[in-house]
Image: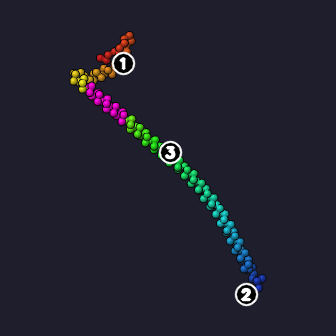
């Protein structure tokens, strides 16, 4: 016996083609709704990621600007330091040249340049003796 020979009422709970199509349509509609909800969620996630990226990009630009300013300031400080060192060095060399010249002159005249320097140095450091207008000599 074939299924064609049986009356549809005798199929013992087998769905009709119309019922199968309705069930399939309902499954497709539910799947479409689930996919729509998932798509909406993913769009929200993408929007939040875009917002995070924009904020991070603004922060990156701000930090790069700060870095450029810090580099410029450090460079200027280095230039200023170099110029100060050059000035100090040239003054130091001038003092050394002057000292060498005076030491040479004092030595040629027969004096002891170190004793003269020590005497001059000590006369500026010692306090004046009360009752006198001059500082005591360092003997």
Point out the residue furthest to the right here.
9
The residue drawn where x is 65% and y is 66% is 35
Which of marks 1 and 2 precedes in the sequence? 2
Which residues make up the magenta segment?
86-103
Q: CA distance from mark 3 to mark 2?
A: 85 Å
Q: Secondary structure at mark 3?
A: helix
Residue 20 part of the magenta segment: no
The residue drawn where x is 75% and y is 82% is 11
Q: Secondary structure at mark 2?
A: helix
Residue 100 part of the magenta segment: yes
Quadrant in the rendering for residue 51: bottom right
Q: Is residue 98 left or right of residue 36?
A: left
What residue did someone put label 3 on? 66
Q: Is residue 61 left or right of residue 93?
A: right
* Front residue of this view, candidates 63 and 127: 63
Q: Is residue 127 left or right of residue 110?
A: right
Q: CA distance from mark 1 to mark 3?
A: 54 Å
Which of marks 3 and 1 precedes in the sequence? 3
Residue 126: which numbered mark, if any? 1
Dot 3 crowding, Cα within 10 Å, few <14, some 14–19, many 20+ = few
The residue drawn where x is 45% and y is 44% is 71
Q: Secondary structure at mark 1?
A: loop
Which of the two marks, 2 or 1, is nearer to us in this view? 1
Residue 4: which numbered mark, if any? 2
Which of marks 2 and 3 precedes in the sequence? 2
């Amino acid at each position: 016996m074939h299924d064609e020979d049986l009356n549809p009422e005798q199929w013992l709970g087998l769905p009709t083609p119309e019922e199968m199509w309705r069930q399939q349509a309902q499954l497709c509609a539910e799947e479409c709704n689930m996919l729509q909800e998932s798509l909406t969620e993913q769009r929200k996630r993408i929007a939040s990621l875009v917002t995070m990226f924009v904020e991070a990009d603004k922060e990156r630009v701000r930090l790069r600007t700060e870095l450029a300013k810090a580099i410029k300031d450090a460079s200027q400080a280095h230039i200023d330091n170099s110029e100060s060192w050059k000035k100090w060095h040239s003054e130091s060399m001038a003092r050394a040249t002057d000292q060498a010249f005076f030491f040479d002159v004092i030595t040629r005249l027969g004096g002891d340049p170190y004793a003269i320097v020590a005497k001059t140095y000590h006369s500026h450091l010692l306090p004046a003796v009360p009752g006198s207008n001059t500082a005591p000599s360092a003997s």
